[in-house]
Amino acid sequence: MKKFQVGILIILVAVVGFVVWYNLSNKTDVATTSQPLRIGLNPWIGNGLYYVAKEKGFFDAEKINVQLESFDDGAVGKQLLNTNKIDVLPLTPETAVVLADAGVKVKIVGMSDSSEGADGIIAAQNIKTIADLRGKKVAFEVGSPSHFFISYLLDKEGLSTNDLTVVNSTAPDAGAAFVAGQVDAAVTWQPWLSKSSERPGGHILVSSKVLPIFPDMLIFREEVVKNRPQDVRAMLRAMFATRDWILANQNEAVGIIAKSFKITNQEVTEQLPDFRWLSYEDNVKAFNYGQPRDLLQKAADLWLKLGLIKSNLNADDLVDGSLLKNLK
């Protein structure tokens, strides 16, 4: 009888052990909360999504410990990622290219938003075309998305930034300098595009509405993607859920974003039509069609041509869309 009872006990222990093992081995999407996931954010209105996610508990719902680290310019963001101070940087394609050229191992796993008129070049009355910028004093942040934007346009005209008098300024400072009459043109973002008319004759020369090359890509340190895929997937789910919530609760979301960036609700509302937060479906479609890869390669080729990077990069090495699969 005792042998029978012992046998039954052994079987029960084995069954319970198998169930525990099976559940643990199949819960690949459970976030690990022992380490914070540090997201680096510049003062771009699209990054308001992450502040909403934090305040409304979308990261908590995914059991992921997120820290939001703010900085003022792209150079600082790249340095933070390079020195392991942050884990992910939502920024434009050329940022990943510059980091990869510097030997930083990065992976693009998704895209958070797309500028569709929020970035552009504002110019004085006598500047009507990109070619008219030759010899003019133009403000933009060297090595930033603004630099890539104007370089891309100049290259199509057979010009480069060497044909300009460059004033190195962050996007907000560049916009302010233009309105104050200190430069002939500026590469900046909203609300400075709309403020260009505050200067007599000031106008928007071109914007990302006609040149949509400005999606913010989720630039992760490769080791985070490799060692913490559950956390990365949890962040993606939280990001997409937040995007859907914002669209359904715009007034409340605007208030949170305004508070986070220390601007008015009206300033946030005025900028919303000029960019788009990307959905899960947008991401799947973009990665299936190779859009992130194509944009990265375009940035890498142009940066190499202009001598801003030394490596002949293959964009395929920078993209990993696998974590988007079966995310929902």
Image: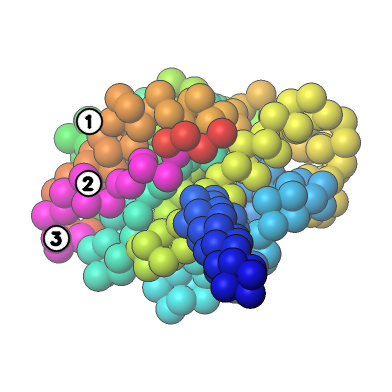
- Residue 157, position as x, y percentages in the image: 22, 31
Which residue in the protein does label 1 denote? 156
Q: Secondary structure at mark 3?
A: loop
Numbered marks: total: 3
Q: Which residue is mark 3?
A: 311
Disc 2: which residue: 315
The x and y percentages for residue 100 are 27, 62
x, y percent for residue 279:
56, 29
Residue that protrudes farthest toward the front in the picture: 1
Q: Which residues are magenta?
A: 309-324
Is residue 108 toward the left or the right of residue 87 in the image? left
User: Which amino acid type corresponds to the residue marked 1 in the rendered image?
Assistant: Lys
Rendered location of residue 146, percent (x, y): 44, 47
Judging depth in this view, the residue of 43 and 49 nearest the camera is 49
Q: Please state if 282 lies on the left or on the right of 172 as rendered.
A: left
Where disc 1 sits, the SS reads helix
In contact (CB < 8 Å): disc 1 and disc 2 = no
Residue displayed at 56% across by 33% down: 328
Q: Secondary structure at mark 2?
A: helix
Q: For marks 3 and 2, give the CA distance.
A: 12 Å
